[in-house]
Image (cartoon, rainbow, N blue to C red):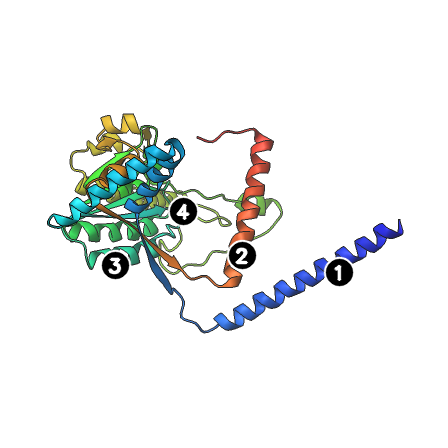
């Protein structure tokens, strides 16, 4: 028992020391980063042709025996020497971007820098491929993200949008800007609609004799509230604002995809890739991997990613947040036995 008591005391001291060190490091990092210019980062560029080549060579090393591999490398060497003697072929370029959208379209910050960079070099002979994954979110946030993509179209550079999982609502607002939309067969697309919801606890407050006052200057400064008493006039104005936003959404989609029967698809419904193609929401059924691997055979394919420089406390916070999210998701899935599709 004495051993366990001593061990517990040692463990507690160790944990306390580690926690103290972490606090000191985070505080020091906060002080160092104080006053630095925010938003600094760097553009990372990788050539996907090299990535595909490395995959193929690793597979060859695993499947072929020593003699076969030697013969293959010799043949490849001769082919490369022969190509070097010939006039250099000017290959087209494909610039690959990724957008993983949350409700605030936070990835727009990196997207804007990636687009600014590629437009400084890209020509109409090149192509931009956006791998898009988003279920939508705030109207103004996805409006800005869509405007960034529109810069590519305005510059005359072909834009292809690839959707492997989902591009709905604000996600489809971005996707429709592509001159070509490619979807995996079971990706989710559509949801061309607008939704807003909020709880109202006014009756609960009244039940407990709690008054809540809402003072405004301007007839429609506040239409629906969480705590105040909502009126029919306020509801009508709120619905009117939703209808106006929906019409703007429809007009935007129609501008870039005039082939759509917009009133048939702008109902807020979603479709899987196969059905979405029938509705003309997408042009081709294919995964982004298949499309890019095929492009790499004849073009130079570059992946662009603008990486923000995060402070130590931000990195620690993100790691902690990710751990908590994973624990909560595991707990919820076990509790409800739900499956997500």
Q: Would residue 336 appear left or right of 115 to someone viewing this image?
A: right
Q: How far apart are marks 4 and 3 (CA)?
A: 25 Å
**Which residue lies under the disc numbered 2?**
317
Viewer-nearest of discs 4 and 1:
1
Numbered disc 2: secondary structure: helix
Query: Is the residue 20 above or below the residue 149 in the image?
Result: below
Image-quadrant location for residue 232 = top left
- Residue count near mark 3 (Cα–Cα under 10 Å), binned few <14, some 14–19, many ≥20: some
Q: Distance between the residues labelled 4 and 1?
A: 43 Å
**Which residue lies under the disc numbered 1?**
13
Image-quadrant location for residue 274 = top left
Report x, y in % for residue 93.
Answer: 20, 48
**Which residue lies under the disc numbered 3?**
117
Query: Is the residue 210 above or below the residue 76 in the image?
Result: below
Q: Would residue 296 appear left or right of 324 to someone viewing this image?
A: left
Q: Residue furthest right?
A: 2
Viewer-nearest of discs 2 and 1:
1
Q: Distance between the residues labelled 2 and 1?
A: 24 Å
Q: Would residue 23 appear left or right of 268 to someone viewing this image?
A: right
**Which residue lies under the disc numbered 4?**
103
- Whether residues under marks 2 and 1 lie with C-beta atoms below 8 angstroms apart, the answer is no
Numbered disc 4: secondary structure: loop
Residue displayed at 21% across by 45% down: 80
The mark that comes first in sequence, 2 or 4, is 4
């Amino acid at each position: 028992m004495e051993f366990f008591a001593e061990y517990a005391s040692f463990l507690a001291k160790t944990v306390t020391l580690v926690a103290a060190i972490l606090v000191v490091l985070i505080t020091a990092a906060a002080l160092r980063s104080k006053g630095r210019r925010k938003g600094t980062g760097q553009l990372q560029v990788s050539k996907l042709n090299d990535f595909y080549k490395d995959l193929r060579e690793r597979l060859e090393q695993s499947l072929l025996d020593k003699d076969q591999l030697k013969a293959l490398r010799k043949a490849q060497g001769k082919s490369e020497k022969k190509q070097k003697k010939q006039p250099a072929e000017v290959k087209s370029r494909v610039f690959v971007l990724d957008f993983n959208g949350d409700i605030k379209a936070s990835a727009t910050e990196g997207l804007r820098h990636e687009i600014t960079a590629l437009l400084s070099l890209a020509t109409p002979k090149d192509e931009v491929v956006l791998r898009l994954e988003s279920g939508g979110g705030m109207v103004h946030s996805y409006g800005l993200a869509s405007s960034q993509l529109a810069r590519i179209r305005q510059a005359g550079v072909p834009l292809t949008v690839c959707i492997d999982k989902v591009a709905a609502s604000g996600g489809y607002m971005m996707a429709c800007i592509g001159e070509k939309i490619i979807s995996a067969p079971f990706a989710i697309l559509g949801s061309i609609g607008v939704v807003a919801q909020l709880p109202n606890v006014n009756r609960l407050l009244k039940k407990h004799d709690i008054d809540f006052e809402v003072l405004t200057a301007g007839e429609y400064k506040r239409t629906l509230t969480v705590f105040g008493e909502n009126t029919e006039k306020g509801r009508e104005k709120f619905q009117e604002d939703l209808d106006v936003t929906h019409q703007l959404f429809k007009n935007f989609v129609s501008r870039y995809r005039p082939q759509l029967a917009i009133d048939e698809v702008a109902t807020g419904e979603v479709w899987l890739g196969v059905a979405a193609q029938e509705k003309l929401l997408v042009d081709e059924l294919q995964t982004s991997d298949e499309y890019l691997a095929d492009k790499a055979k004849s073009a130079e394919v570059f992946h662009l990613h603008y990486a923000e420089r995060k402070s130590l406390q931000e990195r620690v916070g993100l790691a902690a947040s990710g751990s908590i999210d994973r624990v909560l998701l595991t707990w919820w899935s076990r509790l409800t036995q739900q499956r997500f599709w």
